[in-house]
Amino acid sequence: MSGVEVFDSGQMKGEILEKKGLSAIQRYRMLEGGERVLVAVSGGPDSLALLAFLKKLSRGMALELSIYHLNHMLRGEESLMDARFVEDVGNKMGIPVVTESVDVRSVAREKGKSIEDAAHWLRREKLEAHARRIGADRIAVGHTADDQVETFLMRAIKGAGLQGLAGIPPVSGMFVRPLIGVCREEVLDYLASMGLEWRLDSTNLESSFLRNRLRLEVIPFLERQFGRSFKRAILRGVESLQFDLDYLDKESKEAFERVSSVQEGRISLDINGLLEMHESIRRRVLREAWGKLMPCENPLGWRHLRDIGRKLLEGRTGASLDLPSGVVVSREYENLIFTTGRKEGEKSREEMRLDVGESVYLPHLKMELTAQFIDRTNVIFNPDRFEEYIRPDIYLPLEVRFPRAGDRFCPLGLSGEKKLSDFFIDEKVPRSVRKSCPLVISGENIVWVVGYRLDDRFKLRDEDKRAIRLFARQVNLNGGQ
């Protein structure tokens, strides 16, 4: 992007916004040139200034802009007028516009969220979905320095840790925030210099929302007491916290990889590994687990982290704790298990036929089970617990199902029959895993508890000339290993 002349060199009333916006883009590498950018436009001053800025910038950087507007259906006719206003702005600027309507109140009730949280979650989900539809490289949103100050104060009041106090990141995934260093007065100056009008959201004047009380009452009071410089002090502090956060993010992600096992709807953390970590990293690893399961939810609060430490990390196996949005975290022996509350073992109770020479796919485990005949000379015993060889003269076809009450089998290496539930306990198999553990069945008998033990009655014999090879492998969503 270096060497590109974007703006006139002459002085203009709104030049400060352009300089700060371009500086943020260059500093945080938000755009390099040639990107397809989806711009979130509400019709308010911040998003309109962002759109005008990017429209002007696009001439020098070959940006392809699109507009997205979400009608939250919270203000009746006023909301409809906002959508029409944004469509009109897009048409005048020659930028394609898509508007969408969602009943946020209904979603908030359904999800058990506040209207603010539901609106935030929906905006992000809808923006990302539309960005994927049009092949956008970036999603630009109009957060400003004032939003940063308000966010810091709001999270400080709520007792947030570093993750919260570091505020709104300039870049997060596809999202970029070119105006993050621009104050509200500079936004208004810029719009005035461009001769642009904007829409006023009447809910921004309602003091029932914490952010609005901060904006309308607390911040003006602080400005009267300490002058406007208090905002600059907060912004400097947020920037320093963001540097600290970047470093800790790297450390905690590496720590998470060391102790975690991730499956769809389930994350397991090694407790011994967690206890070896500094408390700061440990809590961030717990938040990382939560974030992977619930990427659009607010971070876990300190009370939840405290309870996980007291009741689970220091507790007994079988202890569990309910988290927001239906997530359950439990201790299973030396593992801490986060699940989305779905009963994994109940996802697929039907028996699945497994013909020799064929495979079956278990979607919730992302696992493929295969059975095939091979010559005895090709049998190679190895420690892989997801591969077994069995005698060839068993009752066919094989079937695959999940554990049921009363299941029994004869574990290889043990004398006699054993309840499957007792076997799981002896092997310290986590409760959250037991019901979703696949079983290979011949007739009415368990042949293989996949990943754990073969039934002694089906082991390969010395006189067998052939064998049935059973093996399981993880398969990703695209069908690859």
Image (cartoon, helix red, strand yellow):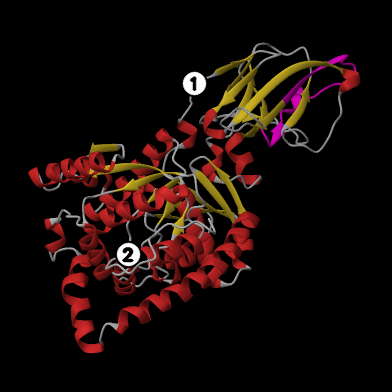
Q: Which of the pair 316/408 is nearer the observer? A: 316
Of the two numbered discs 2 and 1 in the rendering, the one whose residue sits closer to the viewer: 2
Q: Tell me: 11 left or right of 224.
A: right
Q: How many marks?
A: 2
Q: What residue sits right under mark 1 in the picture?
A: 350
Q: Which residues are magenta?
A: 450-470
User: Where residue 441 appears, x then y in whole percent?
Assistant: 63, 21
**Label 1 environment density (alpha carbons within 10 Å; few <14, some 14–19, many ≥20):** few
**Residue 462 appears anywhere in the view:** no
* Disc ID at residue 250: none
Q: Name the image quarter holding residue 360.
A: top right
Q: What residue sits right under mark 2 in the picture?
A: 144
Q: Earlier in the sequence, mark 2 or mark 1?
A: 2
Q: Name the image quarter holding residue 111.
A: top left
**Residue 336 appears anywhere in the view:** yes
Q: Which of the pair 408/380 is nearer the observer? A: 380
Q: Which of the pair 124/53 is nearer the observer? A: 53
Q: Name the image quarter holding residue 73.
A: top left
Q: CA distance from mark 2 to mark 1?
A: 54 Å
